[in-house]
Image (cartoon, helix red, strand yellow):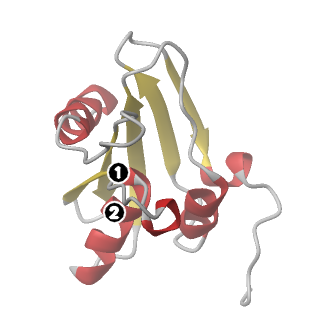
Amino acid sequence: MTNEELINIAVKAMKRAYAPYSQFKVGAALLTKSGKVFEGFNIENSSYGLSICAERVAIFSAVVAGERNFEKIAIVADTDKLVSPCGACRQVMSEFGDFQVIMTNTSGQLIVRNVSELLPFAFKLKG
């Protein structure tokens, strides 16, 4: 699957985000090494700490489905500047390897990095 195809899936997911408080909608599309795609979008809660990011929704959905080997994730927000994953999402990503992270916005800006570049000193209990 091309980056463009994955980004298009993330854009569709972004449109379904539940963000009534911030109006900041984010979508994610995660491609597993087996070729499956899992979508995610941010889901807010009036108790902000109970909100969850798009990236973690996609990753946790994949894990629930038995997938743990990821190739890349596309993250998109309707913003003027690129949006990068928050620290919590970076730490969760690092649990599942050093896959590609495609960060983009609806204006077409794009940057691709690996998880290890976004979180070079990730906390690890093993290895």
Q: Quadrant of residue 92?
A: bottom right
- Residue 69 in the image, given as x and y percentages of width and height: 40, 70
At a point 60% along the width and 50% down the height, the residue shown is 86
Q: Earlier in the sequence, mark 2 or mark 1?
A: 1
- Nearer to us of marks 2 and 1 is 1
Q: CA distance from mark 2 to mark 1?
A: 7 Å
Residue at numbered disc 1:
42
| Residue at the (55%, 17%) spot, across then down | 81
For the question of whether residue 17 can be seen, the reply is yes
56 versus 10 height, above or below: below
Task: Provide residue 95's location: percent of width, then percent of height.
Answer: 58, 74
Any mark on residue 52, and which? Answer: none
Q: Residues within 10 Å of mark 1 (few under 14, many from 20)?
A: many
Assess disc 2: are there few (<14), some (14-19) or many (≥20) residues with their C-alpha within 10 Å of its C-alpha.
Answer: many
Quarter of the image with the N terminus in it: top left
Q: Are marks 2 and 1 in contact (CB under 8 Å)?
A: yes
Point out residue 5 in the picture as x, y percentages from the top left corner: 21, 31
Q: Residue at x 37, y 60 (%)?
A: 45
Closer to us: 107 or 24: 24
Amino acid at circle 2: Val
Outermost residue, right direction?
Answer: 121
| Amino acid type at mark 1 | Asn
Name the side, left or right, on which 75 lies relative to 39. Answer: right
Q: In the structure shown, which secondary structural element does the residue marked by tag 2 occupy?
A: helix
Q: Would you say residue 66 is visible in this rendering? A: no
Quarter of the image with the C terminus in it:
bottom right
Q: Measured along the vertical axis of the image, is residue 118 above or below residue 33?
A: above
Instruction: Classify mark 1: helix, strand or loop.
Output: loop
Residue at the spot of label 2: 57
Q: Is residue 5 above or below residue 105?
A: below
Q: Observer-nearest residue: 4 or 89?
A: 89
